[in-house]
Amino acid sequence: MTLGLQPEAGPARMPASVGDLSAHAGPPPALLFDHVSVRFGAYTAVSDSSLHVGDGEFVSIVGPTGCGKSTLLNVAAGLLEPSEGDICVYGRSLEGINADAGYLFQADALMPWRTALSNVITGLEYAGTERKAAERLGNEWLARVGLSGHGERFPHEMSGGMRKRVALAQTLIRDPKIVLMDEPFSALDVQTRVLMENELLQLWTTYRKSVLFITHDLEEAISLSDRVIILSAGPSTHPIAEFRIDLPRPRDVAEIRMTPRFVELYHQIWDAMKEEVLKAYERNQRKLAD
Amino acid sequence: MSEISANLRTDAVIADRSTSSRTAARPQRRPRRRPMPGPIVLTALQAALFAALLVAWYALVRAKVLPVFFFGDPVLVFQQIVSWFVTGEIFVHLATTLIETLLAFLLGVASGIGIGLWLGLSPLTAALFDPYIKALNAMPRVILGPIFIVWFGLGIGSKVALGVTLVFFVVFFNVFQGVREVNPVILANSRMLGANRRQLLTTVYIPSALSWVFSSLHMSVGMAFVGAVVGEYLGSARGVGYLILQAEATFDVNAVFAGIIVLTVFALVLDLAVTLVERRLIVGKPKS
């Protein structure tokens, strides 16, 4: 057991839901949530959550809306400090911003006063990379996300899909070992979304980042991931089940959804989360009634 | 102008309503809109309106309906303006007012940005200064004019000081707001991309605050201009405000009107210059 090497995360403290750690014998996981709780005043957003993302693994977290998925991601990014518990990045306890991680936000995070190229190389600029080299790399990345020749455009001159591509290039150009994604494609139309998902998979296959992907869309989660983790309805969100997705790779996001194994997995996972979705729905209805 | 045309349209709609209610027997009839004239026709109409006002002014004064002593004579006003420019007398005054306006604008913007950033980034200091800033902003700044004359003399110093107090608050509140309302997602994104505190300031806070400053450029320049002219009017030896002050002292109402017209044209030119600068500076923002 690798985790035995870490003084703060002994195997005895691992809950049953993270039971298949044996699959990760060897290097420590890229990301490990160790009994993490997050409270905002009296409100408990996340309660006693333990989960991990292996090195080079694509893990999705699915849960009903408003269940605190983004809170989990912010904790992993180091933007939010957990009230209890610990985050370990490659075996080291996280303090401050997670420098190994890139974060793709749900909302538009590009600087509206910078061009696409200038946005893409922002991270390199922060790191003090020489301007010429940064721009060369920036143009390479723009080409990689299908935006060559659009470097001089400002965000308001681009479509939602193009802005997401710029954001993706902006995150990946720094070569982070971990990529955190918070429903990055939820604002896109269905066709653009499938395109982006396929491109994301291609990039992931090429660069093998460890990905923690948050979504409320179960189909998206299954078609992209190695593993899908289901969260309970909030408050006091915690993982309630996880499923290994044994669909063959490379995958085509649109086609894989037609395969019998996909449908089978979908039903299994949906059965597990249906109850939580109903709980969240009822709570929303009650809120509206009040 | 657009407001006026909007009003015209509302009038037209109201007129249509009243006709359609009278012709209720034919409910099928669509209310007709009066078509907007083209831009050239509109400009011609605006010029015609101006000419009509001048003629009315002239006629009323000549017919002695309006006493010429109080209302002046448009012909004499025009002659006064021409003579100012022909003799070159006006240029030193225009230059003085322009320099005062520019200095007040630059100093006001610089101090507004500096202090706006400082207070915006430091909530404790902002809370400490809050009542004082509110009080200073509520105070009619023009009453500071006499004090500035005592402090800085009759030269451009006192006018610039007055202009700065006016420009400062416009810029300060915009920067303060801009810093406070920096998009939290952009901020978080920059932190994830590895920005340190100084880099956050230069690449997120300042550009974000500047876009607010640009949106208030017209108002800042206008305020600087008001400060300069009012300062001159309160006591000076040069400037267009000084010209008006002199004319008033000798009951030369034609020269007062001439000064007012020169100032108005000056303000319009200044506003046009700001518009041109703005087009160059504001990038990456949709025109809204």
Image: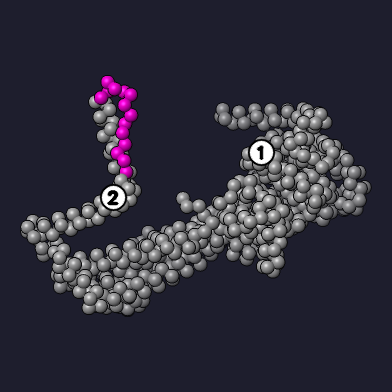
Q: Quadrant of residue B164?
A: bottom left
Residue B48's x, y, as percent? 22, 54
- Residue A146 at x, y = what percent? 68, 51
* Badge 2: chain ID: B
| The stretch drawn in magenta includes residue A289 | no
Q: CA distance from mark 2 to mark 1?
A: 49 Å
Mark 2 sits on what residue? B41
Residue A262 image point, x, y percent: 80, 32
Nearer the observer, A162 or A224: A162
What secondary structure is found at the residue carrying circle 1? helix
Vertical placement of residue B131 versus A17, above or below: below
Q: Residues within 10 Å of mark 2 (few under 14, many from 20)?
A: few
- Name the side, left or right, on which B198 lies relative to B117: right
User: What mark, if any, has residue A50 been given in the picture?
Assistant: none
Looking at the picture, does residue A256 appear above or below residue A100? above
Q: Residues within 10 Å of mark 1 (few under 14, many from 20)?
A: few
Report the span colored magenta: B23-36
Instruction: State the residue position of label 1.
Output: A191
Against A146, residue B173 (above or below) is below
What residue is at 53 percent from the left and 63 percent from the top? Answer: B117
Q: Considering depth in this image, is B97 or A75 the residue closer to the camera?
A: B97
Task: Name the residue: 31% across, 66% down.
Answer: B266
Q: What percent of the width, then of the height, locates residue B75?
A: 15, 65
Extreme-top residue of the structure: B25
Q: Chain of mark 1?
A: A
Residue B144: which quarter of the image? bottom left
Mark 2 secondary-structure assignment: helix
Seen at 68% across and 60% down, the residue is: A138
